[in-house]
Amino acid sequence: MEYRLTITKIIFLYILENWIYSAFALYSIIGIVLHQFFEIDILIPCLFTTFLNIHCPGCGITHAFIELLSFNFTEAWYYNPLIFAVFPAGVFYVIKDFKSFYDKKNA
């Protein structure tokens, strides 16, 4: 009899194996929720701008992501146009990595 893991167990194992990314994602989600609903900003500031007073190419990507979640595409573009390349690439990477993990666990 072949033993196959359920999708819930595989997701849990994936989160455990990628605990650093998962912890950062959880922190970001909590920070975005606090920022959106309670105007509390606990998100990490741009260290490049903080120390050198120069905007880096990634500046505004978090605010652009927040606007993207609200379907404010114009505002997202205003904060950082790279969000329209970074977000789909990130989603593609996570799906591809999870599929590879899933196939490895169910082999």
Image (spheres, rainbow, N blue to C red):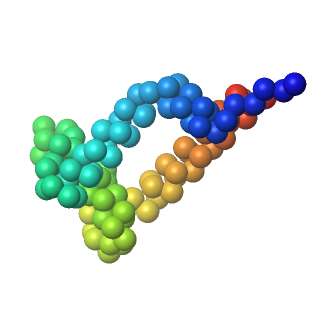
Task: Please give the count of numbered marks on the rendered protein.
Answer: 0
Tell me the quarter of the picture where residue 72 sits.
bottom left
Rendered residue at 27%/51% (across/down): 32
Residue 84 position (above or below residue 2): below
Left or right for 69, reference 8: left
Q: Nearer the viewer, residue 38 or 55?
A: 38
Q: Which quadrant of the figure contains the N terminus?
A: top right
Q: Quadrant of residue 96?
A: top right
Q: Residue at x 30, y 38 (%)?
A: 27
Residue 51: x, y in percent? 13, 37
Q: Is residue 4 left or right of residue 67?
A: right
Residue 94: x percent and y percent?
A: 55, 43
Most extreme residue toward the front, as rendered?
A: 1
Is residue 77 in view?
no
| 103 vs 84: above or below | above
Of all residues, the one furthest to the right in this rendering is 1
Query: Nearest the camera: 3 or 91?
Result: 3
Q: Residue at x 28, y 71 (%)?
A: 75
Picture coordinates of residue 100, whole percent (x, y): 67, 36
**Residue drawn at (45%, 55%), measured in percent from left and top?**
87
Residue 34: horizontal and vertical position, in percent?
Answer: 21, 50
Given residues 53 and 24, the one toward you in this image is 24
Q: Is residue 83 visible?
A: yes
Quadrant where the C terminus is found in the figure: top right
Location of residue 30 by image quarter = top left
